[in-house]
Image (tube, rainbow, N blue to C red):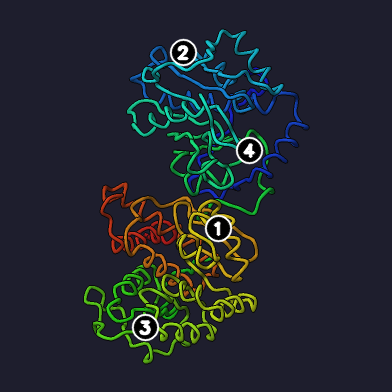
Amino acid sequence: MTASSDSALPTLINPRNRAIPLLTLTDLRILEAQGAAALPAHTLMSRAGQAAASFLLEQITRDPSIGKAKQKVWLIAGPGNNGGDALVLATQLHQAGIRVELCMPVEVKPDDARCALEMARAAGVAIATTPPASLDDYTWLVDGMFGIGLTRPLEGVFATVARQLSQRANARPGKGGVLALDIPSGLDSDTGSVVGEKNGDAVKATHTITFIGAKPGLFTAQGRDLAGAVTLAPLDIDSRARTAVLLNAPELFASFLPPRDFATNKGSFGSIAVVGGDTGMCGAPILASRAALYTGAGKVHVALLGEGAPPYDPPHPELMLHAIDDLPLDTMDALAVGCGMGHRERATQVIHDVLALDVPKLFDADALNLIAKDPSLAAEVTARGVQGDPCVLTPHPLEAARLLGTDAPGVQRDRLAAARALAARFAAVIVLKGTGTIVAAPDGRLAVNPTGNAALATGGTGDVLGGIIGALLAQHLPPYEAALAGVYLHGLAADTLTAQGHGPAGLTAGELAPMVRTLLNRLFYPAVD
């Protein structure tokens, strides 16, 4: 288990804008077993430690104001293979001239990790059994306590250290950070939930280097906050064929976007009707309609259920506002239904009428709650999907819980499972909103969206998302690809605006749509000289 066992520099991958596979615990165990069987003993652990050392040395050298002599790295090793990875990393850093101290409260047990321990001792790595009273003197802290497969909450010294590491990560230090090996200890790699939930502790890291394949839990639920910036080290193990779960990226939907040739016209990009807006609730459909306009739909209509709506939208007179009975919905290329729709009997009848039309449909907000309450509506949604015309449903966790007959904490405990269950139950494309939005298709395809941030935690952003996806349906994207593109652009708009100083606090939903237009053109329709 020496540096010479793999002479080439480790491959390190930034997952940003890449449709990388996301591997479950079962997938990873199979790959680990296959890899170990095909390689010399201890190779995978050696590669993991070397990849982590390469990553950390790169981080250290990025700041020339702190030379190697001033760097001081503290690592904690758990009793399993994650602890072995930490031991290899400590040895590599020590041999590179970095001062390291490693804490190992319980000696490692697996054979690979025992070999790593012997090498660390032979190299002269300082190993203690108890953590120091303070971790303030160290530039980098490394979590090598527990990796994938943890089934019980962190306890004792490991729980205490997890809290210390998290405090350091929350302090947002100007130098250094907290690096988690494979996953932050205490995090469920499949679900993104903390093992033990309310009674459990988990490390909050500023950076995570994950081995062999990325894990779904790093990109959804609590995992997005706990993992920090994620880097993938494949360890020369091919994981592409192991999973149907992917990280959402433009390569999954870009080819479905319509060309914008000179000879096109407004009819080339479809007509959408946003259906909703009971009396006193026309703001939501207006937000959705403006988003549809900025996302490139050729014509945008607003079909309002209530009374007292304005005759037109002064900031955007391009929008065409109608009483719902005055607009032939069957002539539209797509319908986005539910924004501000209310819960009256009239709204239920509109959904029944819409479901009878052979037009691509998205249901959001009030429409989802009506479908959850009315078995006949739910059956009609499912029937559309079974007939090959799947609807797009865009629930937040509470709406998803109502559709599944459970509660929101149950949905959040395993967001991927909830999205799969909804897709199967309704034969629909599901957009399960929240951090790490899940997009699930009834054929089993599943993607986790990496864009978006806390700037989206404000009223109206869900309406904007519905308008974006609806506009893409009107432009004849298939439902799954329209959902992928919509959630990606919606989140990226929030990320871009936040980077410009307009978020995360105080960003309004209406600011998203113009940025979506900018990103759509910048990424997919660049100007031609």
Q: Nearer the viewer, mark 4 or mark 1?
A: 4
User: In the displayed structure, would residue 43 be above or below residue 238?
Assistant: above
| In this view, 463 is above or below 175 | below
The kind of secondary structure element at disc 4 is: loop
* Residue 99 circle label: 2
Residue 252, which numbered label? 1
Q: Which mark is residue 418?
A: none
Q: What element carries label 2?
A: strand
Few, some or many residues within 10 Å of mark 2 (<14, 14–19, 20+)? some
CA neighbours of label 1 inside 10 A, class few (<14), some (14 to 19), many (20+):
some
Say whether residue 155 is left or right of residue 453. right
Q: Where is residue 352 in the image (x, y as percent from the top left)?
A: 50, 85
Instruction: Establish if 450 lies above or below 171.
Output: below
Disc 1 or 3, which lies upstream in sequence? 1
- Position of residue 440 measured from the top left corner of the image (x, y, whole percent): 57, 61
Select label 2 or label 4 by which is in front.
Answer: 4
Task: Identify the residue shown where x is 55% and y is 27%.
Answer: 145
**In the image, which disc is placed on residue 303?**
3
Q: Which of 153 and 96 is in front in this view?
A: 153
Pointers 4 and 1 in contact (C-beta within 8 Å): no
Q: Is residue 261 visible from the viewing direction of this image?
A: no
Which of disc 4 and disc 3 is earlier in sequence?
A: 4
N-terminal-most mark, 4 or 1: 4
Element under disc 1: helix
Determine the secondary structure under disc 3. Answer: strand
Residue receiving disc 4:
149
- The residue located at (35%, 25%) in the rendering is 175
